[in-house]
Amino acid sequence: MKRPIAVTLSGILLFLISLGSILVAGTLVFVERWLAATPAGPAAPEPFSVAMMTYAVYGSSAFLALGAAWMIATGIGVLRLRSWARVSIIVLAALLAFFFGAQLAASVTMLVSASPIGGLGTPGLTLILLLGVDVLFVALAVWWIIYFNRRPVRALFISSQTASGLHAASSPSLRPLGITLIAWLLLSGATMLPFFLALSVPAMIFGFTFRGGAAKAVYAAWTVLMVLSGYALFKLRSLGYALAVATFLLSAVNMLVMYVVPGAFETQQAEMSDWMRSRWPSMAGVPEGPGAREGKIAGLVAGALGGACFVVAPLLYLLLYRTDYFAAVARARQRSP
C-alpha cells in the first residue's frame, strides 16, 4: 500500500526530533559532569543549588531520553502505517503543542516587557530565536493533529493494519479516540502522587489551603477519583462518564477560582514559595532577580494554557460527544458475552 509523502515526512521528522532530544540530553549530562569536576572557587554555589542542579539535569535528561525512545517507536510505526502509531503521534503532537505553546506565551511576555534574561542585557535576539523555534514546533504539532485526524488518513492506517492481518476488519475499536486520550490523561495523574506525598506539597482547593496530612489526604482522594474515572472510561462503563465529567468540572472550578478571585493566584505563589523555603532553608532570604514580575506573568499564562489543554478541552469534548460515548457503551455491551 502506497504511503503518502506527508506520512513519510512525519516519520522522518520524528526521527530527527528524537535525535535532537538525545543530543540535548547528552550535552546536559556532559556539561554537568564537567562542571562537577571543576574545582570550586570562592563564589561556588551552595550545596543546595548544586544538588538541585544535578537532580534537574539528570531528570531532564531521562525525560528527553524517554521521549526520544517514544518518538523513535512512533516513527517506525507511522512509516509502517500501524494504527496505534497514528494515535501515538496525535498524543505527541498534543504534548508538543502544550509545551511549546506555553513557552511561546512566556517568550512573547518577556519580549514585550523587554526584560533581560540571565544578565544578557537586551533579550531581543535570544527571545526572537526562541520564539521562532516555539512557533515552528506549535505549527508542526497543530498540523499533525489535523492531518492524522483526517478521515482518509484514519482509513489508510486502519486498512493497512487490516491488510497485514494484525487486526480483524470486523472488530474495530469500540472506544472513540478522544475517549482513549482522556482516559490515559486521567490515569497518568496517578504518577504525581508519590511526589506530592514525599515532599508534603500543600494543596490549594477552591481558595483553601491544606497542609501536612490534610494535603496528603486531598491528593490521595483526587488521585483515586482520577484513576477510577480513567479506568471506567477506558472500559466504557456508564459510570465513567459521570466520574470524568465531575473530575474535570471540579478542576475547572478550582482553576476559575484561582484566576478570577482577587489575590488567589498571588496567595498560591506565596504558599508555594513558603513551602520551598521550609523544605530547603538555604532558599530563605534569596531576593527576587530581574524579570521576576514577567516570570510570574508568564507562569500565569502557562497555567492558563495548561488548564485549557488538560481541563477545559477534555470537559468540552465529553459534553459535546456524550451521545457518541454512550453509543460506544451500548456496542460494548452487545459484544460482551
Image (cartoon, rainbow, N blue to C red):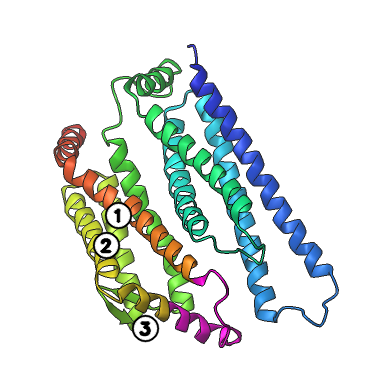
Residue 77: say if magenta. Answer: no
Choose top left, top right, bottom left or bottom right for residue 75: top right
Q: Is residue 116 above or below residue 51?
A: above
Residue contact at pointers 1 and 3, CB within 8 angstroms: no
Residue contact at pointers 1 and 2, CB within 8 angstroms: yes
Image: magenta residue range: 272-292
Q: Is residue 273 above or below residue 29?
A: below
Label 1 vs 2, first from the N-terminus: 2
User: Which residue was labeled with disc 3?
Assistant: 211
Residue 280: say if magenta. Answer: yes
The quadrant in which the C terminus is found is top left
Q: Say how many tags the image has.
A: 3
User: Which residue was labeled with disc 1?
Assistant: 311
Q: Nearer the viewer, mark 1 or mark 3?
A: 1
Residue placed at 35% from the left, 50% from the top?
309
User: Which residue was labeled with disc 2?
Assistant: 251
Residue placed at 41% from the left, 22% from the top?
157
Residue 337 seen by the camera: no
- Give percent across and percent down for residue 91: 42, 41
Assign a secondary structure to mark 2. Answer: helix
- Give percent across and percent down for residue 116: 60, 64
Q: Nearer the viewer, residue 87 or 101?
A: 101
Mark 1, other Cα within 10 Å: few <14 / some 14–19 / many ≥20: many
Q: Horizontal placement of 63 versus 139: left or right? A: right
Mark 2, other Cα within 10 Å: few <14 / some 14–19 / many ≥20: some
Residue placed at 70% from the left, 46% from the top?
23
> Label 2 sits on what residue type?
Ser
> Label 3 sits on what residue type?
Arg
- Give percent across and percent down for residue 102: 45, 53
Q: Horizontal placement of 62 versus 212: left or right? A: right
